[in-house]
Image (spheres, rainbow, N blue to C red):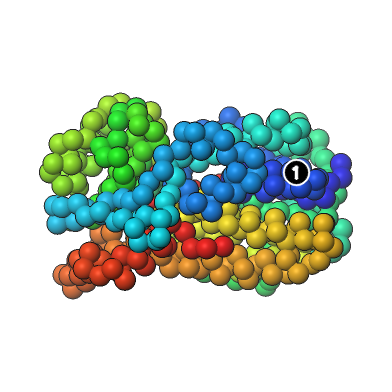
Amino acid sequence: MRTQVAIIGSGPAGLLLGQLLTNAGIDNVILERASREHVLSRIRAGVLEEGTASMLDEADAGSRMRREGLPHEGFDLAFDGRRHRVDLHGHTGGKRVLVYGQTEVTKDLMDKRAATGARAVYEAADVLPQDFATGRPYVTYKVDGRTHRVDCEFIAGCDGYHGISRKSVPDDAIETFECTYPFGWLGIIADVPPVNEELIYANHPRGFALCSMRSPTRSRYYVQVPVEEKVEDWSDARFWDELRRRLPAATAEAVTTGPSIEKSLAAIRAFVAEPLRFGRLFLAGDAGHIVPPTGAKGLNLAASDVHYLFEGLRDYYIDKSSAGLDAYSAKALDRVWKAVRFSRWMTSTLHRFPDQDAFGQKIQHAELDYLFQSRAALTMLAENYVGLPY
Ligand code: RFL
Ligand code: PHB
């Protein structure tokens, strides 16, 4: 088959790009390795920046998000047995974030794609971007053992950190930067009311904890655990006990526990590939970069990449200008590195590191204390959390 833009991956990046292109009359095909159901079963992000929410509106897929998403104007940082509120709204001239699960974002975009009749192939095996250094790129894939070919003008690699797009680039054309952490996040979802109306990020001698939510009746909680930990070793009771130990006493008492409906362990790392363009192949979202989840930036960076990439493709097809595509990598990476910086700062300020000595602990404490003594420091936190401008 033929198309203008072949998109690899049906996560938020691929679906959002696909919908913006479809709405602009630019033909595209999505090739996804997993089944629709599998993609929808992954529990991930929960916090949308205003820019991300606006892009869903622009894709004409934002109506349920506007109805059911929870606007949050602040969150709490807990340390020394007390909670301190970060007033996002007050420190950013009225901005807020929206709590709405990535699963719901993905579902809304899939439904929209189906309604517009745009093409998508699920359970496509051995997807391979080819000849993208030339003017005639194509992508091959297999369904039921038979090989198919999509001839296209551009390829968008939106296939996540483990995808094939980045791996298809010759080693000497790409540079990668990485920082790994000796811990992961063990997360659960439970159908119990959240302990607080806003999120709570907790710094505690036993390790970091996060109280988040998906709705007024569905909670999402995380605790920092050593990277080698096994999910099987964590009963619900053990999880709830550990979570409560890391929260201020009154908050711990207010936690409603219940059976988990999902429990998983996520590794924490920062990773950036440069550049994000290789001839006619563009990387967007987790395919090009990963940030630790502490700053809630991964999904939002996928959306900002798509913003710049869509602008470039629209300029190319509608205004016959390559300027936007030529600028894509530099523009996207500029925003990515600032989110890496912020996520790394949040991570190092809130987690316990195995090699953290008394000096490191004093510095961490001073960092947290300073935030609530300085409007400038809190503004830095707030403006990054709500998302830097595109
Ligand atoms: P995705 O979502 O990984 O989608 C990639 C898709 O590509 C498919 N694929 C392939 N298809 C064809 N051929 C291949 N060879 C393929 N290889 C892979 C995959 O099946 C998949 O469907 O990447 P995308 O679209 O770039 O989206 C990125 C986000 O998913 C990610 O950044 C966020 O989930 C990160 N994240 C958070 N981000 C936020 O902005 N706010 C948050 O609050 C937040 N919390 C989180 C998070 C990530 C977490 N985990 C699990 C790492 C919390 C957690 C616990
Ligand atoms: C979530 O609700 O899954 C979530 C919220 C905030 C984060 C990371 C994850 O920083």
Q: Which residue is mark 1?
A: 22
Pick the front one: 301 or 90: 90
Residue 273 in sight here: no
Q: Residues within 10 Å of mark 1 (few under 14, many from 20)?
A: some
Q: Residue at x 32, y 46 (%)?
A: 199
**Considering the numbered disc 1 on the image, is that residue within a helix, a strand or a loop?**
helix
| Rendering coords of residue 128 (x, y %) | 74, 50
| Rendering coords of residue 334 (x, y %) | 56, 70
For the C terminus, give its image quadrant.
bottom right
Q: Residue at x 81, y 40 (%)?
A: 147
User: Is residue 267 left or right of 87 when viewed as pictured?
Assistant: right
Q: Residue at x 15, y 36 (%)?
A: 253
| Rendering coords of residue 342 (x, y %) | 41, 65
User: Is residue 32 left or right of 354 when viewed as pictured?
Assistant: right
| Rendering coords of residue 104 (x, y %) | 52, 35
Amino acid carrying mark 1 in the image: Thr
- Name the outermost residue toward the front: 93
Q: Residue at x 82, y 40 (%)?
A: 148
Pick the front one: 335 or 167: 335
